[in-house]
Image (cartoon, rainbow, N blue to C red):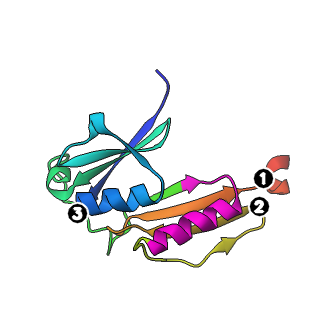
Amino acid sequence: MKKQIAITLPVRDLERSKAFFAGLGFGFDERFSSQHGAGMIVSDDITVMLASEDIARTLCAKPLADPRSSRIALLCLFCDSRAEVDAVASKALALGATLPEPVEDHGFMYQHGFEDLDGHMWALTFIESMPEQQAAA
């Protein structure tokens, strides 16, 4: 079986979160969607399960952390160009996301990002080429 990844993100308002991510261009797999969650397709190999907080609390014994006040994970989404990074970040901000960090331009790597409606941090990243030091190693 091909390796894939599915990430579960607790959300306060499922319909609002679905509308936000649909506005960013993501689709949903209805086979993995219900009134309690939605399977968001990021790519052929990446699925994000948007789970209502009530359901997310049942998935493990530990309490849910509030992503608005604690950083649990950083979701890094690679883009095909600097323009795509900026376009997705701008669209996310227009849909109600917040900008937690300024743009970072390292020459070979360009990053921008947003916190979604529930405070989950998404880093949008474009890597043009490897730095010469790393490529030589």
Circle 1 sits in a helix, a strand or a loop, which is it?
A: loop
Q: What span is in magenta? A: 77-94
Q: Are marks 1 and 2 in contact (CB under 8 Å)?
A: yes
**On the image, numbered disc 3 is attached to which residue?**
13
Could one spot residue 73 in this view of the protein?
A: no
**Is disc 2 surrounded by few (<14), some (14 to 19) or many (20+) residues within 10 Å?**
few
Q: Nearer the viewer, residue 114 or 107?
A: 114
**On the image, numbered disc 1 is attached to which residue?**
130
Q: Tell me the distance, in whole angstroms, between the alpha carbons under discs 3 and 1.
A: 40 Å
Q: Residue 30's x, y, as percent?
A: 30, 38
Q: Nearer the viewer, residue 3 or 14?
A: 14
Q: Say the numbered circle drawn on residue 70.
A: none
Among numbered discs 2 and 3, the one appearing first in the sequence: 3
| Residue type at tag 3 | Asp
Circle 2 sits in a helix, a strand or a loop, which is it?
A: loop
Q: Nearer the viewer, mark 2 or mark 3?
A: 3
Q: Are marks 2 and 3 in contact (CB under 8 Å)?
A: no
**On the image, numbered disc 2 is attached to which residue?**
108
Query: Is residue 80 part of the magenta span, yes or no?
Result: yes
- Residue 82 sits in quarter: bottom right
Q: Tell me the distance, in whole angstroms, between the alpha carbons under discs 1 and 2.
A: 6 Å
Among numbered discs 1 and 2, the one appearing first in the sequence: 2
**Is disc 1 surrounded by few (<14), some (14 to 19) or many (20+) residues within 10 Å?**
few
